Image (tube, rainbow, N blue to C red):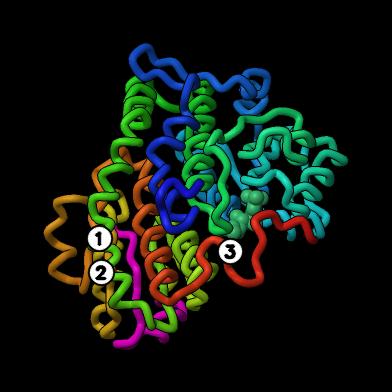
Amino acid sequence: EKGGYDHFMIKEIFEQPRSIADSMRGRLRAADLHLQLGGLDSYLDKLACAERIIIVGCGTSWHAGLVAEYLFEELARINVEVEYASEFRYRNPVIRENDMVIAISQSGETADTLAAIELAKSRGASIFGVCNVVGSSIARATHAGAYTHAGPEIGVASTKAFTAQVTVLTLIAIAVARKKNTITEESYRQLLTALEAMPGKVEKVFEHASRIKEIAYIFTYARNFIYLGRGLNFPVALEGALKLKEISYIHAEGYPAAEMKHGPIALIDEDMPVVFLATRDSSYEKIVSNIQEVKARKGRVIAIVTEGDTLIPEMVDFVIEVPEVHESLTPLVSVIPLQLLSYYIAVMRGRNVDQPRNLAKSVTVE
Ligand code: M6R
């Protein structure tokens, strides 16, 4: 059932080219500019008119929500709030008539997310679900939705569900943007074409798996890790830190790279591994100076860079390359090395990767 792999997690990591393709299947055809999500039809107008989108979720699903925040704002010019379901539900949130709620959940059974949906519903909000498990409680509780179609995810650490969530949320953001005319037909075409190419791009990251394993070996006994990124790579930094924490039990923190100087930089010394998401995008120059700040304090830097980068490899201790992609799609490739890094470190530490201590696949307690 593990298809020859040692763990479900690694099987699911390597499945991502296919699961990403599955999450777009029948929904996207760049050749004739076709983009349609069945469940979205009746909600497209509502989303296009929304004054605000409130996204709720927990854990990795909340990280996918943060990626979606950047995309909805950038492409569709809609104001977005991303909320931890557990915080949202216990506040007295302001939900206005033209607000739309998007709930994200792999399992569709997360108690806090379900409760947040019920609360938003009781205040008259329309809820759109992005779930992986068909027929799950959250899928049934929402007014409409789009499944992620990543297939069953068994490893407790979410991997292919995250990339499928990001893919589906990207499709939605693009569809809404087109509807609102906030992107040109040319950028629409470019985005659709770039999305179609994503499974192949993810496949290319796997060429570096043995290098990532070597790096993991070097850092197996690290006690702390910091992950830094900017823009769309900030949620990826959070996701990388969460992956490492939950399966290797190494303390890890994700931060927006620019926040370093407001405190966390005090942690940097020669024993501190720092993972930088440093792909060539609009934050590239800023990230380069953040790397310099960390190197000046002797931090050990692992940088995720775009193929062919010659500047950063000169500055840092280790690099892992990812292929160049459309900037809006960066998280789909930059998260892959982080999943692999945490997997290999956890395996080398002898951890129970698929079922880490204290964790369950569906968190049905409040
Ligand atoms: O099933 P859900 O997406 O609602 O689950 C939310 C979180 O419990 C989940 O993402 C958790 O953080 C994962 N173990 C992360 O890998």
Q: Quadrant of residue 129?
A: top right
Q: Which mark is residue 246?
A: none
The magenta stretch is 261-278
Q: Are marks 2 and 3 in contact (CB under 8 Å)?
A: no
Q: List x then y, in percent, for residue 144.
A: 71, 28
Front residue (pair 177, 323): 323
Residue beneath the point at 38% across and 38% down: 17
The answer to whether the beta carbon of the residue marked 2 is less than 8 Å from any atom of ligand 1 is no
Q: Is residue 235 shown above or below 23? A: below
Q: List x then y, in percent, for residue 136.
A: 73, 39
Could you tell whether 61 is left or right of 183 in the image?
right
Which residue is situated farthest in the right direction here?
A: 122
Residue beneath the point at 57% across and 51% down: 154
Amino acid type of the residue that numbered disc 2 sits on in the rendered structure? Glu
The residue where tag 2 is placed is 214
Label 2 – label 1 distance at C-alpha? 6 Å
Q: Which mark is residue 210?
A: 1
Secondary structure beneath dot 3 equals: loop
Amino acid type of the residue that numbered disc 1 sits on in the rendered structure? Ser
Q: Are marks 2 and 1 in contact (CB under 8 Å)?
A: yes
Q: Are marks 3 and 1 in contact (CB under 8 Å)?
A: no
Q: List x then y, in percent, for residue 49.
A: 64, 26
Front residue (pair 211, 54): 211
At label 3, counting other C-alpha atoms closer than 10 Å, the crowd grade (few under 14, some 14-19, many 20 or more) is: some
The residue where tag 3 is placed is 355
